[in-house]
Image (spheres, rainbow, N blue to C red):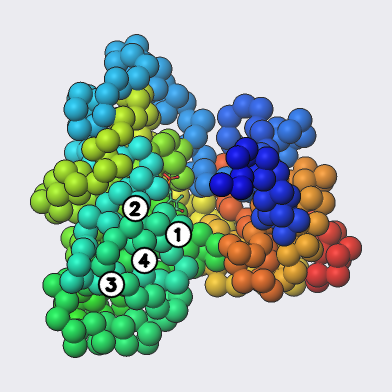
Amino acid sequence: MKQKTTAFFKDEFNDLDEKGYTWTIRRLAGPSKPHVTVDGKKCIMLASNNYLNLANHPNLRKAAIDAVKKYGAGAGSDWSIAGTMDVHQQLFDRIAEFKNTEAAVTFQTGFAVNAGVIPQLAGKGDILISDELNHGSIIDGVRLTKTDRAIYGHSNMGELEKVLKEASKKDYRRAIVITDGVFSMDGDIAKMDEIYKLAHEYGALTYVDDAHGEGVLGNGYGIGKEFDLEKEIDFQMGTFSKAFGGFGGMFAGSEYTVKYAWNTARSWLLSAAFPPHVAAINLAAMDVVEKEPERVKKLWDNAKYFKKEIESLGFDTGYSQTPIIPAIVGDSKKAQTLANMMYDEGIFALAIVFPMVARDKARIRNQMNAGMTREDLDTILRVYEKLGKKLDLI
Ligand SMILES: *Cc1c(COP(=O)(O)O)cnc(C)c1O
């Protein structure tokens, strides 16, 4: 062995850093909301997934405090052994009701759902068919199987059909088409109606990752409701960590699909239940989405206004159809520079660069929030106008 200490990681890190692939951790002082203090500077938040502004909602806070009083701090065990409390079971049942599926279960995170469940849904003699822009947790889940795999071009239904046609000629036991519901870098929506139709036609099953769609699409109920396919989509996963303002992954489907999933996914079997107050927060979040429908409406009003105005300044927003609205800059360095200059102006936004997006499609990802006022949006737009001119982008 040549490397007897970890000293080489310094070189490896510096190498990553030179390529611009490293992250700097930014620290918020206080709750996540539209106005935050980031590393000591007051900013308007444009980079959080807190679409409905629920992360600091009084009902969610109160649910957490009450649950700590009733259930204590931790769950004390794995989901499978002694960590599942009645408040967790209430959450499973409530998700099934909310998603209009037969059953549901939760995992620590959405990542743990995809990485843990996908490998159990297919094996030798099966095929998984995945959109090229699917989330990294899906990619990891798919890599953990011995099953055949195929990737189709992003939302390219012609390619999907070709893959399905090829697959139908071979004697596969089952085929599963896997897609993000809302794609997180472009903010476009999967063509779920066409995907379902094609899958159905060729005898394949469908798996959708609704992480950026829950709380946003279908009046907050997610992609199933949006396309009226709640019962038809075979496997639905999602997370409470985005629009719902809470934490934890979920998996929903038919009774036996869900039972099978938690009985086989190692990320569920061998890992602790999330704390009971997290379950209580998530329950409260679904209630608020139903009781305060004006939040979803405000989120979309903000998204429509911002998209229209930033386009009229001359920015390209790509394929955005949701509250994720990129401002495409092109060059990676320029996107980083713009994000840094925005921060100096009191706007916290994330630059997304290669390898997350194509080399010439670097961008600022603007994520809308139901708690933003028209004044906030106008402030952001003025900064875009000023810096866009300065950097020769518009
Ligand atoms: C955020 C995200 C996840 C992971 O969810 P967590 O609960 O944060 O682990 C999975 N899939 C997609 C598409 C996501 O955007």
Distance between mark 1 and mark 4 Cα atoms = 9 Å
**Residue underneath mark 2:** 114
**Residue underneath mark 3:** 148
Choose mark 4 or mark 2, whichever is in front: 2
Q: Is disc 3 in contact with disc 2, using a CB cutoff of under 8 Å? A: no
Q: Is disc 1 in contact with disc 3, using a CB cutoff of under 8 Å? A: no
Whether residue 193 can be seen here: no
Numbered label tally: 4
Q: Is mark 2 within 8 Å of ligand 1?
A: yes
**Residue underneath mark 1:** 135
Choose mark 3 or mark 4, whichever is in front: 3
Q: Is disc 1 in contact with disc 4, using a CB cutoff of under 8 Å? A: no
Choose mark 1 or mark 3, whichever is in front: 3
Q: Is disc 2 in contact with disc 1, using a CB cutoff of under 8 Å? A: yes
Taking 350 as reference, is 90 left or right?
left
Taking 180 as reference, is 5 left or right?
right
Distance between mark 4 and mark 2 Cα atoms = 11 Å
**Residue underneath mark 4:** 179
Give the class, few, some or many, for how many residues have Cα within 10 Å of label 4's Cα (few <14, many ≥20). Answer: many
> What amino acid type is highlighted by mark number 1?
His
In the image, 168 versus 301, the foreground residue is: 168
Give the class, few, some or many, for how many residues have Cα within 10 Å of label 1's Cα (few <14, many ≥20). Answer: some
Q: Is mark 1 within 8 Å of ligand 1?
A: yes
